[in-house]
Amino acid sequence: MPGSSLAPEDDGVSETAAGAGSAATKAAVPFEHVQRWGRACIVVLALFVPLMVFTYEDLSANLTTLEFVDADLPVSDNEILLNHARLGNVSTAAVVLGILGAILWLVWQYRAHRNVAAVAARKPRFGAVAGAGSWFIPIANVLLPPLAIADLWRATDMHDSGRQARWWRRVNPLIGAWWVAFVASVALVARASALALRASTPDELVARDHAFQLAVLVVIPAAVAAAILIAVLDRRLMVAENAPAFRDWQGWTTRRGEPPG
């Protein structure tokens, strides 16, 4: 029948329009696979957490031998050398993973800022260079990095009508928890490193290892919070990137339980 031939043609038109919308969206995004960088950073953080657990255990073993030495109790030289070797290996691995994770984070954050600037309804306050570069500004880097991440959060909020409180008052608790844990871990690692530089006696070495143990206990939740934060922001960014291709879908801007506007 003549009428029946219209359905396949309509489907073809719909598929073509959808494809054109998707292509237009991809063309508007500078980096199509920014989530891959986020996932790579999450993998490094996932490896970093068990490595910190091993570091804590090796520090405990090293503390035991140091306490034996300090108390003039018999302890094997081989055991001392073995503990030092294991602690040196995990410390080196932690430094390597830390540097790799920092590089992946900066690449991911730069690209996320670029993509958000291309698809956000309102212009973000932090550009890509300012966002990633905020980590390298002395003194200001105590405050600017979480504000840059909060800007990513705000810019990817599909429910943000602009009528809420100002953006710096709406920082998600996840960002606050991550940043507090991160700053605390950096401060504790710096303190432990300072003790390590001047440690020579058994008592000073014991104090050094206790300081590193405390730092490790804070580094672990900081790494977990960072991985969760990246995963959530990647999800929000993916939604924001795809929203322009499906502007008529009420789900982008309608909260659960609210009638479509």
Image (spheres, rainbow, N blue to C red):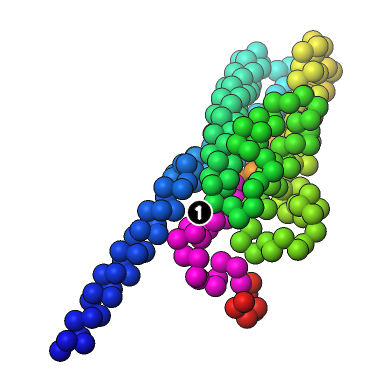
Farthest-out residue, bottom: 1
- Read off the magenta span: 228-254
Instruction: Give 260 or 76, whichever is nearer the viewer.
Output: 260
Check the image and name the residue furthest to the front: 2
Q: Position of residue 103 (x, y in %)?
A: 56, 29
Would you say 221 lies left or right of 28 here? right
Question: In this rendering, is residue 139 above or below 219?
Answer: above
The x and y percentages for residue 140 are 79, 30
Type of amino acid under label 1: Glu
**Residue 70: x percent and y percent?**
82, 17
At x 70%, y 47%, the residue is 150
Q: Quadrant of the C terminus?
A: bottom right
104 in the magenta segment: no
Q: Position of residue 121 (x, y in %)?
A: 60, 55
Q: Nearer the viewer, residue 39 or 240?
A: 240
Majority secondary structure of the magenta segment?
helix
**Residue 235 covered by magenta stretch:** yes
Name which residue lies at 61% across and 61% down: 158
**Judging from the image, what secondary structure is the residue with disc 1 in?**
helix
Q: Is residue 142 visible?
A: yes
Residue shown at 76% from the left, 52% from the top:
167
Label 1: which residue?
A: 241
Residue extending farthest left? 1
In the image, what residue occupies the spot 51% across and 60% down?
A: 243
